[in-house]
Amino acid sequence: MSELIPTSAVVWMQRVEGEPVQLPSGFVAKLRRLDPISMLAPDGSLPDSLLDIADQASNEQGGIASQLESYIKMKPVLDRLVKATFVTPIVGDEPDPENGQISLDAVSMADKLFVMSWVFGEMNNLALSFPEKPDGNLGTVSDSEGIRAAALSLAGDEA
């Protein structure tokens, strides 16, 4: 068994400081990966607009009008996500180029959707790493005596 080594402060700060990412527009921004849970509503629920987009994507139904309606509902969530994710340039409500800030309007919808995918993609990758069902090697509560006896036997004691 290998010994666990704590993650260095430098590595922790790289996550906070962000990494350069090329956006669909061709621009490069320094983005930080957020904890997707931070995008939950204050009551701990997912915003309806986010649920609508996820539901529509999973069903792959609805025409352009339906998709447009979903994206319009999604805009406040996307704007919040973009503001929180961009490190450089800073994204705000109004442009302030002298202080390194662009407006939300300067970020295209394609770039905003890409950022959402980039942030939530990490969560999907984590979810994909867990097996859907146990492989059958797990004991059950009813097997507890058998497991205890096997463990004691391996330890050199008798059950």
Image (spheres, grey):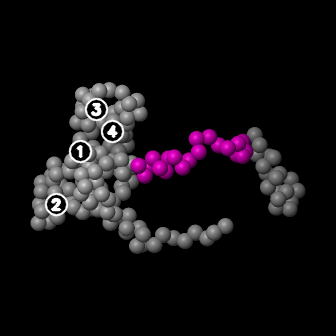
Please tell me in which quadrant of the rendered image residue 55 appears: top left
Label whose residue precedes the other's in the sequence (1 or 3):
3
Numbered tag placed on residue 67 in the rendering: 3
Up/down of 28 relative to 82, above or below: below
Rounded to the nearest whole Å, what is the CA distance between mark 4 and mark 3? 12 Å
Numbered tag placed on residue 109 in the rendering: 1
Rounded to the nearest whole Å, what is the CA distance between mark 2 and mark 4? 26 Å
Please tell me in which quadrant of the rendered image residue 3 appears: bottom right
Q: What element carries label 4?
A: helix
Q: What residue type is labelled 3?
A: Gln
Label whose residue precedes the other's in the sequence (4 or 1):
4
Numbered tag placed on residue 50 in the rendering: 4
Label whose residue precedes the other's in the sequence (2 or 4):
4
Looking at the rendering, the stretch of residues picked out in magenta corresponds to 121-141
Q: How crowded is mark 1: few (under 14 residues within 10 Å), some or many (20 or more)?
A: some
Q: In this view, does 105 lie to the left or right of 22?
A: left
Residue at point 18%, 55% (across, down): 92
123 in magenta: yes
Between 22 and 10, the one nearer to me in the picture? 22
Q: Is mark 3 on a helix, strand or loop?
A: helix
| Outermost residue toward the front in this view | 26
Label whose residue precedes the other's in the sequence (2 or 1):
2
Which one is in front in this view, the residue at disc 2 or the one at disc 1? 1
Q: What residue type is labelled 1?
A: Met
Label whose residue precedes the other's in the sequence (4 or 3):
4
